[in-house]
Amino acid sequence: SSIQSKAMPKEKNVNVTKISRQKNKRAKALKDDKVDTKRLPWSLPPIPKNQTSSEQFMKELSAFKKTLDIPLPWETTPRSNLPLPIISLSLPKSATTTTRMYFSCGNLTTAHTNRPFATTRIGDCMRDNFLNGTSPFHGCETNVRTNEVVNVWTDIGIPDDYCFYSSLHDGGLEHIAKFYPNATLLLVVRDSESWIASTKKWAGGRLLRKWRDTCDFPLEKPVEGDKVSDRDWIDFYEAHTEKVRQFAKKYPQMTYVEVQLGDATANMMEFYSGIPHTCFGDCHPGKRQLRCGLHSEKPKDIDNNDGDENDKDESVSRDDDNDDDGNNDDD
């Protein structure tokens, strides 16, 4: 069945006092050792010598699934929608905000970085639930204001002292598969050299510093910070893609969609999801509003709808897709 797109949400006010109060409560919990901040093990596989493109990998995975008689939603008659929930495993600076707005335009309830209209980080929920053996989004699964169940999740990691990324930390992907065996996993892959250039530029490289200092990324055997090169980060990004691909092949019953970020992304997203390609624009977060526009349009301001505009000091938040100079950089 086809999916109809919807208008973007209206602007909303932000309760700055409430957000600040919740930040202080969280900081106190850390100080009082009420939050488990132990660093969890993570690993990445070797990068294939000739890593295939997203398009080629999807062709190979689709052919493999057909040998197992596993139907592909985009090839069924009548066409099926992607199974819910849709969980984006894309790393920051890989169109995570744009992805969220795309599915929101397609009438799905989305969450990006935080639980909608709350300051609770998705990564907090996922880490706590991972350690407790409970469902990944338990405690965060609904929109605070509307009580709608979230069915699309983007920017689901957290880079603070309690660092957690399901697609990087050991057992994280298996944890998702255990509770959502029929979910859709989505990966938007950016050119790795473009990714590191953009990530270094964003907030003076703050995300990379957090990853290095609190997550022990990008090297599995930590070294002095000044010894981490751009090549190390590029290898990290490409190995992450490989890890997700290996998981997709190991769990073929889950729906997997991978697209390369570029000129054809919008059309490929429509091909897989059925949501009009016109919903896929270039979105750049600001303090109060998102700036979104189609490829040929000047970005327009719209509400960011997640209540995390003032969360900058806490960790890398919605602005993970925005470059310092505000230039359109395939975010």
Image (spheres, helix red, strand yellow):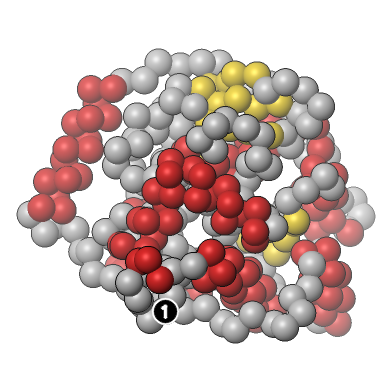
Residue at 69% across, 78% down: 249
Residue 75 place in picture, x, y as percent:
89, 59
Residue at 51% across, 22% down: 289
Q: Is residue 303 above or below residue 152?
A: above
Position of 171 with respect to 88 (left or right) is left
Question: Counting other residues with Cα less than 10 Å from the Cα at mark 1, is it few (<14), some (14-19), or many (20 or more)?
Answer: few
Depth order, front residue of 249/194: 194
Q: How many marks?
A: 1
Pick the quarter of the image with the C terminus: top right
Depth order, front residue of 212/267: 212
Q: Quadrant of residue 158?
A: bottom left
Q: Is residue 231 above or below residue 158?
A: below
Residue 314 place in picture, x, y as percent:
29, 42
The secondary element bearing badge 1 is classed as: loop
Q: Amino acid at mark 1?
A: Glu
Residue furthest to the right: 77
Residue furthest to the left: 32
Q: Is residue 61 above or below residue 205?
A: below
Residue at 72% across, 20% down: 298
Residue 66 place in picture, x, y as percent:
86, 76
Q: Quadrant of residue 60?
A: bottom right
Position of 106 with respect to 239 (left or right) is right
Residue furthest to the front: 226
Residue at 50% across, 74% down: 174
According to the picture, the residue beneath numbered tag 1 turns out to be 220
**Residue 42 seen in render:** yes
Residue 169 place in picture, x, y as percent:
43, 72
